[in-house]
Amino acid sequence: MSLLEIKNAELKLDGKDILKGLSLSVNKGEVHAIMGPNGSGKSTLSYMLAGRDGYELEGGEVFLEGQSLSKMEADERARSGLFLAFQYPVELPGVGGISFLREAVNSRKKFLGEEELDHLAFVKEVRKVASKMFVKDEMLKRAVNVGFSGGEKKRFEILQMAMLKPKISILDETDSGLDVDALKIVSDGVNAQRNEDNAIVVITHYQRLLDYIVPDFVHILSDGSIIKSGGPELALEVEKNGYAGLINAA
Amino acid sequence: MLHKVKNNYITSVKNHVSQFKENSFRKLASNDFKSWPSPREETWRLSRLGVLSRKEITPIIPDFKKKFSSVSQFNGSIIIRFVDGALRKDLSSKLPPGSSLNILGEEDSLKCLHKFKDSNLKNHPSTNVSFSCTPSIVKLTIEKDVNIRNFFEIIYEGGDDNLSVHPALYIDLQDNSSITVIERFNHLSSLIMPLQLIELKKNTSMDSLKIFSDNQQSYNLSANCTFLSDKSNYNSFSVIKGGIFTRSETHAYLQGENCNLNLNGVYLSSKNQHHDLTTAIYHDVPNCTSKQIVRGVLGGKSTGVFQGKVRVAPDAQKTDGQQMSRAILLSENAIANAKPELEIYADDVVCAHGATVGEIDDEQLFYLKSRGISEKKAKQILITAFLKDIINESVEASMQSFVFKEAELALSEIISEEI
Ligand SMILES: Nc1ncnc2c1ncn2[C@@H]1O[C@H](COP(=O)(O)OP(=O)(O)O)[C@@H](O)[C@H]1O
Ligand SMILES: [Mg+2]
């Protein structure tokens, strides 16, 4: 059984077809990259998977470990082990970083039947993970994403991923707006979490990120469906010839 | 029929006045009380008092034997207690050196009345009725160069069904002095009409916190008139959560240069409550800054009103006036009104204003839910943050946790009803 199975997903936004029969199967231990030009439906796909209101499927289905997601709210999906790193992380004025993380982690732990961490133990754990991600203490004390630089926001997303230990993570353009150093930090953070029991879907516009997070499979998304799949070499083809060549050939 | 009942209150106010010996200022004021404001009056359009004219109300005769019921919330605070609108020295603290509490005589009371009559509070019902009926005008004086660290905690309590209560307080901060004043309104069901006159002389500073938490059947029509001289600072924050109808109206006159004024607050409304924060800031001289930041959370069938007026006189160049109001509606039947009013007659000024009324932000809600946090918890987090944000920004650090706790109590009531 696949960890994540997307079957013929169809989705409309504002009456316009955005996902047009998209299928993808992701197994444990795999890293998939989805590449596509702007407007091809990458973020729409990630919001659909995460269960955002208004992104319900018109046709097709999605399964997480064989369980249909269609009736599950976003919070239920997250507790079940699905994680989305946002392309544009949302600012939460007045919500402190630590208490936000603690609420999220405890929600997941409760679902898993694990014991919730007390405040001190939790802070210790966050600090340990954060220091690997070069997330400073001072940043954790601030309101979530408020006044963070682009790079800080992305690092904070990956910190959340590390704390929540999801089964499947969807990273929506986590590379956008990062310089090379930041890209390396974020990629190291993601790579450290790869294991035999989870899977990662890296969504990106550019090949660059895939030098750092090396995928097992690469898929080209164009106009709401996957037009080509292959190995890491497909990403290099995009880099060399652009999307146009691939799209025309398909 | 309506008319007759309305006249009854006018008559009982007049009768009440006649029992005082020194009553020149009372007579003047009572002659000007001809009716409750009509909804045709612009500042009362959104907060209608019609229901008061259908009630049989009489001014309270203070019971000086009444015990107090609200206990102090601050260690070491200097308590000043009003029961039934009357100062109770026996239930108040001894004042620290450099400060004093006096009852004003007739002449000084008349001067106070004139200050209100020269202001735009001249027709406010509390002006006329409370100058008529107050047991006495109490003056708190802080002498020159005196800085009092301990909080003044002013507790207003008492009242009863169908009675009107009329505390009147005049705070005089003499040059270079500073104080922090916390006022808590904790009346039983009644009509409360507090009057307040504040004079901030040169280079003074006052932090003010008001918690309106009268019983849920009360009406509170607080009227505050504040005058600021050169280099004075008035930093005021109100929490409106009590009463069936609570309106806090503050008029601040910036009369000296380099003053700094904040009239901020939150209202937390549920069930049938009507809450109103009305402020008016008059920039009469150059180089002053003012801020009005107001946030509201509403559930049930409650209504919230924010009316913020900023007037910048032709001479008041280099004025910086900011005004921002935001309300979150948690129920389809709740209503929030915001009425900014900017009258700017000077050209070299920075004045910004904005008002939003809406529901909880979708994107923020989704972000929290996408982290596994339930919708209910997520909403609670966001509303709490909405209040925490303004409290942290506007309330003096040592009072933040108290204010937050006060707000949180009301909030949990709204949330339990709605989410
Ligand atoms: N709320 C919306 N309503 C209507 N169309 C939308 C909405 N959001 C995105 N779109 C459209 O859907 C298409 C895919 O957008 P998106 O998924 O954001 O693309 P990508 O992430 O690949 O750049 C675009 O054509 C975009 O204009
Ligand atoms: Mg996108």
Image (cartoon, coloured by chain):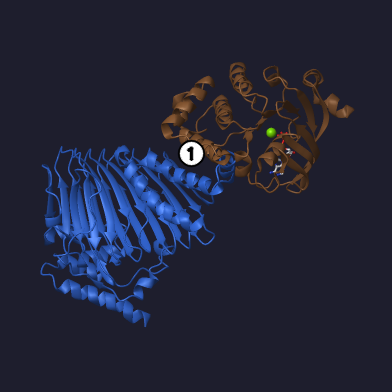
Chain colours: A brown, B blue
Mark 1 sits on what residue?
A93
Q: Position of residue B293 (x, y in %)?
A: 41, 46
- Furthest residue to the bottom? B1
Q: Is residue B218 left or right of residue B373?
A: left
Q: Residues within 10 Å of mark 1 (few under 14, many from 20)?
A: many
Which is nearer the eye, A28 or B80?
Answer: A28
Count all numbered tags in the image, as a single digit. Answer: 1
Is A25 positioned to the left or the right of A171 in the image? right
Quadrant housing residue B274? bottom left
Work out whether residue B164 or residue A221 is closer to the camera in this orientation and state it: A221
* In the depicted structure, whether residue A109 falls above or below residue A35: below
Q: Indicate which quadrant contains ligand 2.
A: top right
Height in image: B137 above or below A24? below
Cβ of disc 1 within 8 Å of ligand 1?
no
Counting from the top left corner in percent of width and height, residue B337 is at 47, 57
Element under label 1?
strand
Judge by depth and name the residue closer to the eye, B96 or B14.
B96
- Front residue (pair B301, A137): A137
Q: Is residue A4 left or right of residue B227?
A: right
> Where does the N terminus of chain B fall, quadrant-wise?
bottom left
Q: Position of residue A80 (x, y in %)?
A: 63, 39
Residue at 47% across, 23% down: A136
Inspect this view and state whether residue B256 appears.
yes
In the rendered image, residue B50, in percent from the top left (x then y), is placed at 39, 71
| Residue B306 appears anywhere in the view | no
Q: Quadrant of residue A82?
A: top right
Q: Inspect the image, locate mark 1, and give the three-letter code of the amino acid beneath it.
A: Pro
Say which chain tag 1 marks: A
